[in-house]
Image (cartoon, helix red, strand yellow):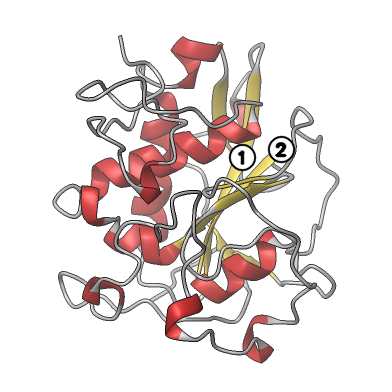
Amino acid sequence: MVLGGTTAAVSGGLGRPQSTAARTPPPEAPPMLDEPAAQPAPTPGPPASRPKLRARDRAERDRTGRAPAGSRSTRDAMGQAGVRIPAGGSGKFVVTAPPGNSADHAAGAGELTYTVEIEEGLPFAPTVTARTIDRILDDDRGWATVAGRTFHQVAEAGELRMLIATPETTDVLCAPLRTNGEVSCRNGDLVVLNARRWAFGTDDYQDAVPMYRTYLVNHEVGHAIGYAHADCPGPGERAPVMQQQTYGLDGCRRNPWPNVG
């Protein structure tokens, strides 16, 4: 059930959510996707009109021919606690009110503001989800320590929009990059987190979904502040947060934080 908040409708074209106020864009960087070589895709229509993909085409392949870890898992159809993630949604998002007296907050140097928005119909409590994202971005193991960037949740006109979207809406918002209903992306001022991954993680994180969520937020926000993908430094070492851990660990140990010290 969706509680409170305001909604922003997905517009036509690339399907970006309508903006009701001017935003200051984050530092320029190309849109990044959790796959190594995204290819341009035809501009998709609204989520409701998108054709369903064949089973063998549902996951984009990386350079070794692997699909994202867990992409064919039965968890995608029925969650570990009976949670269901619909393939598509309305394309409208509920904006979660920030905690505390956000209006009295004094922005510091290097700070980015953001909204937390959940697509209607998804089974995630808005307040709990926003608190989770806030704690991840405020942690000493995060980008504040590594890159000197801090983050502050606002009710509107954020410089970044943290969107949790159904797989089909993720495809629309990430275009022209391909997500094929399986992975997440950062596209302009949008940080689009695939609800399937938020709910179920991947095979490498199937026993630690909260840890995967931490990785997912830090990875995509890392792209938003200018960081590119990284490789596993060696067997048994901790995976860099900018490694594409959704596709597998390549011999590294899982790690959701930018600061691996």
Please indicate whether residue 185 sits to the left or right of residue 20 in the image.
left
Examine the image and state in which quarter residue 50 appears. bottom right
The residue lying toward the viewer, choosing from 211 and 94, is 211
Residue 138: x percent and y percent?
A: 42, 25
Examine the image and state in which quarter residue 142 appears. top left
Above or below 116: residue 9: below
Residue 121: x percent and y percent?
A: 46, 78
Above or below 148: residue 75: below
The residue lying toward the viewer, choosing from 232 and 197, is 232
The answer for how far apart the CA atoms under marks 1 and 2 are is: 6 Å
**Residue at x 29%, y 81% (from the top left corner):** 77
Tag shown at residue 159: 2
Using the rendered image of the protein, determine whether residue 120 is visible from the camera's viewpoint.
Answer: yes
**Residue at x 56%, y 45% (from the top left corner):** 36
Tag 1 secondary structure: strand
Amino acid on which the number 1 mark rests in the picture = Tyr
Amino acid on which the number 2 mark rests in the picture = Glu
Whether the residues at callouts 1 and 2 have beta carbons within 8 Å, the answer is yes
Q: Residues within 10 Å of mark 1 (few under 14, many from 20)?
A: many
Tag shown at residue 114: 1
